[in-house]
Image (tube, rainbow, N blue to C red):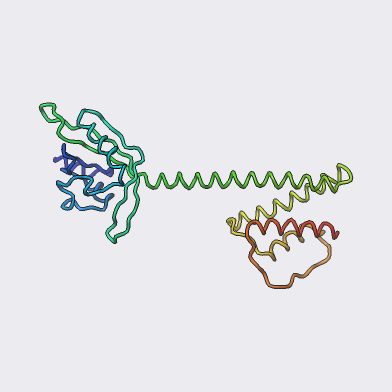
Amino acid sequence: MRFGDIADAWAMPLMILDRELCFVYANEAYLSSTETAWQDIKGRYIFDVFPDEQGRQAPVEALFRKVFEGQQTMLEAQPYDLKMPDGRIETRIWQAVQDPFRNEQGEITHMIQRAEDITAQVELKRQNEVMENELAHRIRNMFAVIMATSRISGDSAEDVGTFVNDFNERLGSMSRVYASLTRNKWKGLYLRNVIKDELDAMMPRNGSSYELKGEDVLLTVKASKDAAMIVHELAANAR
């Protein structure tokens, strides 16, 4: 069985360059990942096929040259721009290992590169970092609101019991609006729903009914939280 038959069955992209850094082989996974055809890259200098940004090509080429000195080298999270068949430029991120290939006389004649497309993993990591930063930001804001709520409750309380009751009710209002925002994927709430949630929570089960009139409006996230607190305070003062 030929080497090419085996390598073409691999899911991992693999290509071979000669000492001039020209293509002498690329398996099917490599051609598929790079959106290229073998007849278009055969015998061509790699940086003519995949031109890199100025200032970034030289270090990569130097790394490739070290392979011909007998070193195994590695490219960590290396981005490159790939021109798609429809003309779009798409950035891919590869992690690759380059190994020297020796002939029967022990001379290094070629470089073998085994690559892995980690674009999806890098993007997922970026999204996770954004989410972590957003979560940390919201937690800081929440603690700031809780401390402000504590001060407000303390200023108006006549005794410890009143403070605890007022503070817990305000925290309950915060909890309701945060739960509603979470269910709505933090896209803001309708004013009618904010008012209804607060009034229903503040009124006794067999208390007076109420009627809401007027055009509804979708609030921003900040406005949703502010509106919930305002309605809560007005309802609490009206009891």
Vertical side of 188 occupied by 65: above or below: above
Q: Residue furthest bottom?
A: 214
Q: Is residue 119 left or right of residue 188?
A: left
Q: Residue furthest front?
A: 55
Vertical side of 70 occupied by 61: above or below: below
- 185 or 3: nearer the viewer: 185
Q: Position of residue 115 (x, y in %)?
A: 29, 41
| Residue found at x 51% / y 47% | 130
Location of the C terminus (image quadrant): bottom right
Q: Residue furthest right?
A: 158
Q: Position of residue 106 (x, y in %)?
A: 13, 26
| Residue found at x 10% / y 27% | 105
Q: Position of residue 54 (x, y in %)?
A: 30, 45
Q: In the rendered image, which quarter is residue 62 located in?
A: top left
> How many numbered discs?
0
Q: In the rendered image, which quarter is residue 59 located in?
A: top left
Q: Residue furthest top?
A: 106
- 81 or 13: nearer the viewer: 81
| Residue found at x 72% / y 45% | 146
Location of the N terminus (image quadrant): top left
| Residue found at x 79% / y 48% | 152
Q: Is residue 228 left or right of residue 103?
A: right
Vertical side of 124 occupied by 199: above or below: below
Q: Position of residue 198 (x, y in %)?
A: 74, 59
